[in-house]
Image: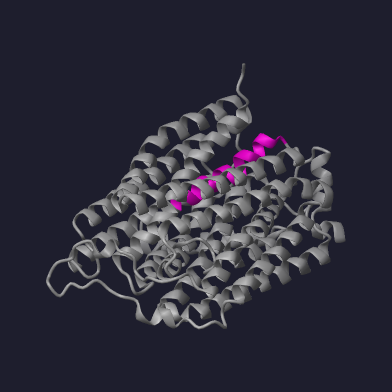
């Protein structure tokens, strides 16, 4: 019996996302253990990583458009998995040597620098693999079938949410019941071993789908790159020019505003990232409980992906996105309700006592003690339920781009989208660095809610003005493809 090609794709994606979800959960806790009492270390790490993502995601996407699919995927996977494994090994060494901000300070800064560099490399390579898979491969696999594309998109996101549900529980259980060192070691081993399975599965997909070996590349840049002088100044100038050229390509798309709306959602501290995990930890939410909360949020996300396909069949892609935007804003309102409550318990966070010259196991002990208070519970409710609307919103916008962007511009546009996402990530992390005291977290919540409301208003305005993507959906159902300039199938064409 022949195994369907989609099974290989989904299995490879599951292996990759499992490793990513374990690492994204664990790194926030690792950093807060190394430097308690402040978000500064976590903020600086995320700030630098996202700054590089903002600057380089667009050029990486443009480069990916010019390279063979399988070769590019193999290179990106090697870099991504090896960099995460190396960073996890460094964390293991840090815990074994009891390196923290309060103990062995010189080594602490060396280790943090190395982990940050590896974080930059893994983030950029992860962006490349996501662009290749989500913006290109699955579009080719769908063979211009809109319903099939919706199902593949939903299944890929569903797999991601299941990994979000289970992977942090595994990591959190290890960190709570055994030791943080074991969790970091597990992540390192997983990324080394899983690479071979991921690549083998994707190579099978590439072999079974001949269309993946045929790729239309963007004209013009290759000759310019060959003639470019070696001068570092001219290389920087070319990089800047290339970035703004890519931004121009992005905004030439009829669905560009929806991509900007999606990027605005990234300006938030109300996601399961390093900052939020650290804040919950400071509010006496234990590692395992954080993992369980992430799992519940993933359940809402899975439910959103399940609802997405029937929603698109009944209402259309853009209308489904509008529904997701509204439900997302409601969940943010629940988090907003936590702001008026007092946060006095955060004014007395203990730090390790190193007066005797020893560190012991202080960096692994609970940071605070006491019950989980009402404002923390409201935040937990909000960030778990918002996954439902978030993933409907995200899937709708992603499919809008898949349906309207020409093949030779998919990764270029996807790279710019990733760059915008990283920019707003960078912005909120910069704000976190400006307000590192946990007692000021309410300011960040207010900014996050304002960004979400703006995103929702802009998207609803675009939808009401253009009528969504009815023309694109009709043309895709007829088996047609967008023209080279990517403008004949967008919502503006319908209005005209």
Furthest-left residue in view?
356
User: Over which residues does the magenta segment extend?
Assistant: 124-143
Is residue 357 rendered to the left or right of residue 190? left
73 is higher (above) or lower (below) than 29: above
Quarter of the image where the C terminus is located: bottom right
Determine the residue positioned at 73% across, 65% down: 326
Return the residue nearer the eye: 393 or 226.
393
Q: Is residue 395 magenta?
A: no
**Does 136 lie within the magenta span?**
yes
Residue 142's image quarter?
top right
Tally of marks: 0
Snapshot quadrant of residue 345: bottom left
In the rendering, at what x and y percent does residue 302 appear? Answer: 63, 48
Q: Main secondary structure of the magenta part?
A: helix
Residue farthest top in this picture: 1
Q: Identify the residue at image location x=36%, y=74%.
A: 38
Counting from the top left corner in percent of width and height, residue 75 is at 42, 40
Q: Which residue is nearer to you in this view: 352 or 231?
A: 352
Residue 352 horizontal side relative to residue 81, left or right? left
Q: Is residue 92 visible?
A: yes
Left or right placement of residue 455 versus residue 223 in this view: right
Residue 68 in view (yes/no): no
Return the residue nearer the eye: 25 or 465. Answer: 25
Does 454 sit above or below residue 397?
below
Tell me the quarter of the image containing the N terminus.
Answer: top right
Q: Position of residue 407 (x, y in %)?
A: 65, 44
Classify residue 277 by image quadrant.
Answer: bottom left
Residue shown at 37%/35% (left/top)? 193
Between 361 and 466, the one nearer to me in the picture: 361
Where's residue 25, x and y in %?
A: 44, 55
Q: In the figure, is residue 299 to the left or right of 33?
A: right
Residue at left 48%, top 77%?
441
């Amino acid at each position: 019996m022949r195994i369907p090609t989609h099974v290989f794709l989904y299995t490879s994606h599951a292996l990759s996302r499992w490793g990513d979800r374990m690492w994204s959960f664990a790194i926030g806790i690792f950093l807060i253990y190394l430097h308690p009492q402040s978000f500064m270390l976590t903020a600086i790490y995320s700030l630098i990583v996202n700054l590089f993502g903002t600057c380089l995601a667009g050029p990486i996407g443009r480069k990916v458009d010019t390279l063979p699919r399988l070769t590019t995927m193999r290179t990106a996977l090697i870099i991504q998995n090896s960099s995460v494994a190396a960073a996890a090994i460094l964390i293991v060494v840090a815990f074994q040597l009891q390196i923290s901000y309060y103990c062995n300070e010189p080594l602490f800064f060396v280790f943090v620098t190395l982990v940050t560099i590896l974080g930059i490399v893994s983030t950029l390579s992860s962006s490349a693999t996501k662009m290749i898979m989500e913006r290109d491969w699955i579009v080719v696999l769908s063979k211009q079938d809109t319903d099939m594309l919706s199902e593949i998109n939903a299944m890929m996101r569903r797999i991601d949410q299941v990994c979000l549900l289970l992977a942090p529980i595994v990591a959190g259980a290890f960190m709570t019941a055994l030791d943080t060192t074991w969790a970091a070691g597990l992540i390192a081993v997983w990324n080394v071993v899983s690479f071979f399975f991921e690549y083998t599965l994707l190579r099978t997909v590439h072999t079974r789908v001949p269309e993946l070996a045929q790729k239309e590349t963007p004209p013009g840049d290759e000759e310019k790159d060959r003639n470019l002088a070696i001068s570092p100044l001219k290389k920087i100038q070319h990089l800047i020019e290339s970035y703004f050229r890519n931004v121009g390509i992005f905004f030439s798309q009829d669905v560009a505003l929806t991509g900007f709306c999606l990027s605005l959602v990234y300006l938030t501290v109300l996601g399961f990232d390093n900052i939020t995990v650290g804040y919950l930890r400071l509010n006496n939410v234990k590692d395992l409980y954080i993992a369980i909360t992430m799992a519940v949020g993933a359940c809402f996300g899975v439910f959103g992906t399940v609802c997405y396909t029937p929603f698109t069949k009944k209402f259309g892609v853009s209308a489904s996105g509008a529904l997701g935007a509204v439900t997302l804003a409601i969940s943010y309102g629940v988090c907003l309700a936590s702001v008026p409550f007092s946060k006095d318990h955060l004014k007395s966070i203990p730090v390790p006592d190193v007066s005797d010259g020893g560190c012991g196991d202080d960096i692994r002990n609970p940071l605070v003690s006491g019950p989980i208070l009402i404002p923390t519970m409201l935040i937990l409710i909000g960030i778990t339920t918002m996954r439902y609307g978030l993933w409907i919103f995200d899937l709708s916008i992603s499919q809008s781009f898949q349906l309207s962007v020409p093949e030779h511009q998919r990764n270029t546009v996807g790279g710019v989208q990733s760059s915008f996402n990283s920019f707003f990530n960078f912005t909120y992390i910069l704000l976190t660095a400006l307000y590192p005291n946990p007692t000021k977290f309410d300011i960040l919540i207010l900014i996050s809610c304002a960004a979400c409301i703006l995103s929702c208003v802009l998207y609803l305005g675009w939808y009401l003005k253009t009528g969504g993507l009815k023309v694109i959906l009709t043309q895709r159902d007829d088996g047609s493809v967008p023209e080279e300039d990517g403008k004949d199938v967008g919502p503006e064409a319908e209005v005209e």
